[in-house]
Amino acid sequence: MNIIGRVTADAQVRNVSNSKQVVNFSVAINDSYRNKSGERVEQTTYFDCAYWLSPNVAKILTKGTVVELTGRVSARAWTGSDGEAHAGLNFNTSQIKLHGGGKKSETVQTPTGTNNSKEKDDLPF
């Protein structure tokens, strides 16, 4: 399954048994539709994600980054300490593709020390 969404907070690396590490992060997916009355309804779904292959990916999974994830989804339910029932969606991530948008997104810089003014003047449009 593939999902595309925005990272909601900087990813965190957690140590688990047998000296393994997991990267935990959350992704929000926005969707909208029109109801029977013709009103636009906005809906956000949150996934708690886990990535086991490399802890280094946590450096690029920063709040606001748009990511495309491949993996499998599972649902979980639990009872909180207050006795309330809760439910959530987990996404066990096997592949991550960045689409930018985070605070560490790359910027394109123009080379310094070059004068392109003549080339710009010669353009036909």
Image: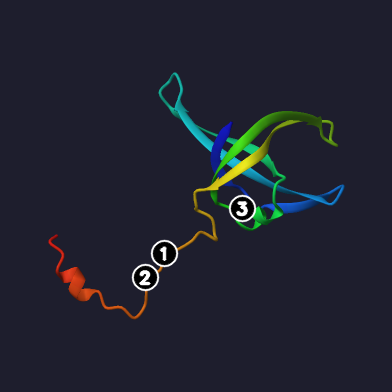
Left or right placement of residue 13 versus residue 60 in this view: right
Contact (Cβ within 8 Å) of mark 3 with mark 2: no
- Which residue occupies the extreme left position in the image? 124
Q: Tell me what residue is drawn at x 59 percent, y 53 percent.
A: 63
The answer to whether residue 104 is above or below residue 45 is below
Q: Measuring from the top left, give residue 115's x and y in whole percent.
A: 26, 78
Q: Which mark is residue 61?
A: 3
Mark 2 nearby-residue class (10 Å; few <14, some 14–19, many ≥20)? few
Tag in front: 3 or 2: 2
Nearest to the observer: residue 87 or residue 98:
98
Q: Measuring from the top left, give residue 37's x and y in whole percent.
A: 43, 20
Contact (Cβ within 8 Å) of mark 1 with mark 2: yes
- Which residue occupies the extreme top position in the image? 36
Sequence-wise, which precedes: disc 1 or disc 3?
3
Q: Tell me what residue is drawn at x 30 percent, y 78 percent.
A: 114
Q: Which residue is mark 1?
A: 108
Distance of mark 1 from mark 2, alpha carbons?
A: 7 Å
Q: Where is the N terminus found, in terms of image quarters?
A: top right
The disc labelled 3 sits on which kind of residue?
Leu
Sequence-wise, which precedes: disc 3 or disc 2?
3
Q: Which residue is mark 2?
A: 110
Nearest to the observer: residue 65 or residue 92:
92
- Which residue occupies the extreme bottom position in the image? 113
Image coloring type: rainbow
Q: Where is the C terminus found, in terms of image quarters?
A: bottom left
